[in-house]
Amino acid sequence: MAQESEPPFNPADDKLPDEEQAFASLWELLRRNTEFQVIAKKWIASESFRKDHALAPEYCDFRRLVPRCALDWMLTPKQRLELAQFQIEKRTWQFGRHRNFGPITWHWRDPLARMSRKTAYDSIEVRPMKNAPAPITFNTAWNAVPEPFKRQFRFAAQPRKPAFASINQTIGDTSPKARPLCVRH
């Protein structure tokens, strides 16, 4: 049965603060994108597609957190937990508090001081989120998505600055022939 789409939501017509309008606009554009809709339908319907896509560069790229956040919230807590366990097993889990999305929580079992690169993945414990909201769909307008999704989506949408941005700027200002230390975004 096809799910009815929420009525069109125009963030500019609502009385949202400017910053919130930007996040709402980004979600509204993403959910209406036909390429994203095709991927989202496959993502929801097929565990094997989820696993394949979770290994794909476009999903793993930390610069593309917005669609990954949305896809992860389209899963039930059980589906997201299973995918998280697969990501840990395949060593594609994203370290960092705010780089894993969906109705799950995670923490380190062992203190960071006792971990190494080899043992870090074995130290991750993932659980379903308590009182998790229902999965979102691309039919859900910004004003109807749950607050936990909005919090994570806001983080995913924040612009990223390379770690050495200020140093690169200083080098660039003082020496036109100098190469930046890091150009990753």
Image (cartoon, rainbow, N blue to C red):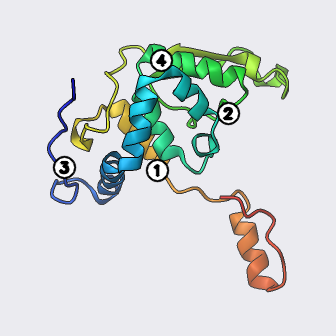
Write down the residue under mark 4.
Answer: 79
Describe residue 75's horizontal placement relative to residue 99 as left or right: left
* Nearest to N terminus: mark 2 or mark 1: 2
Mark 2 and mark 3 in contact? Answer it, CB < 8 Å. Answer: no
Q: Which one is in front, 174 or 150? A: 150
Write down the residue under mark 1.
Answer: 157
Please, is residue 43 above or below residue 175 in the view? Answer: above
Dot 3 crowding, Cα within 10 Å, few <14, some 14–19, many 20+: some
Instruction: Give how far apart the Cα atoms at labels 2 and 3 are.
Output: 34 Å
x%, y% of residue 164?
74, 61
* Nearest to N terminus: mark 2 or mark 3: 3
Dot 2 crowding, Cα within 10 Å, few <14, some 14–19, many 20+: few
Describe residue 47's horizontal placement relative to residue 95 as left or right: left
Please, is residue 185 above or below residue 53 in the view? Answer: below
Instruction: Give how far apart the Cα atoms at labels 2 and 4 are.
Output: 20 Å
Q: Is residue 65 visible?
A: yes
* Nearest to N terminus: mark 3 or mark 1: 3
Instruction: Give how far apart the Cα atoms at labels 1 and 4 are.
Output: 24 Å
Write down the residue under mark 2.
Answer: 95
Describe residue 41's horizontal placement relative to residue 11 as left or right: right
Determine whether the residue tagged by mark 1 lies in a helix, strand or loop: helix
Which mark, residue 9?
3
User: In the image, what residue type sits under mark 3?
Assistant: Phe
